[in-house]
Structures are given as structure tokens and as C-alpha cells.
Image (tube, grey):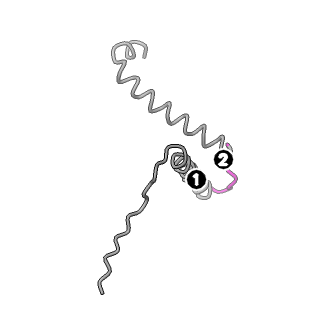
Amino acid sequence: MYHYFQLNRDEFMDHYHKRSNIEATNAAIKRKFGETLKSKNQVAQVNELLAKIVAYNLTVVIHEMYENGINPEFLHVKSDVCT
């Protein structure tokens, strides 16, 4: 790996930073919502984990709205009403 790193530093760093971002996100979710899942069966555990991820993503969007003045547009509804 050391030789691969020396010969392909840019490619290695791109891969490393993707992994680093994933690890940081996982750690943030665990800090905010706890490390354990309360559900007993596997389907419920998957749903609980997905709910934690959605909740985390919403907290990030809300934070960016207030911190950076971003106005997210989630859904564009076209009002083509025929009368």
C-alpha cells in the first residue's frame, strides 16, 4: 500500500477522503442519536437506522438554512389547473 500511495497519491487521497467523510458522518449520527438500536427484529432495526439517517439529514439541512441562509426547495408543485 505504501508504494501504491507513493505512485498514485491523488487517486489514493480521493479514496481516503470519501472514506473519511463517511466515517465522520457515521460518528455524527451516533453522537446525535445514540450508538445502539432499540428494535429487536432485523426489519425494524433497518427502519430505525434509516429513520436516524433521515433525521440527521434534516438537522443538517436546517443547520445550513440558518447558518448560511440557504433556502432549500424540496418539491416543485406545478399548479396547472384546467377550468
Task: Determine contact: label 2, label 1, CB under 8 Å.
Answer: yes
Mark 1 lies on residue: 55
Q: Main secondary structure of the magenta part?
A: loop
Q: Position of residue 24 (x, y in %)?
A: 55, 34
14 displayed left or right of 35: left
Q: Position of residue 7 (x, y in %)?
A: 33, 14
Q: Residues within 10 Å of mark 2 (few under 14, many from 20)?
A: some
Q: Amino acid at mark 2?
A: Phe
Q: Which residues are magenta?
A: 35-42
User: Residue at the spot x=35%, y=24% of the render?
Assistant: 11
The secondary structure type at the circle numbered 2 is: helix
**Quadrant assignment, res 3:** top left
- Upstream in sequence: badge 2 or badge 1: 2
User: Residue at the spot x=37%, y=16% of the render?
Assistant: 4
Q: Is 16 drawn above or below residue 36 in the view shown?
A: above
User: Residue at the spot x=38%, y=68% of the render?
Assistant: 77
Q: Does the magenta-highlighted stretch encompass residue 63?
A: no
Alpha carbon separation for disc pair 2 and 1: 9 Å
Q: Nearer the viewer, residue 46 or 16?
A: 16
Residue 33, numbered circle? 2
Q: Amino acid at mark 1?
A: Ala
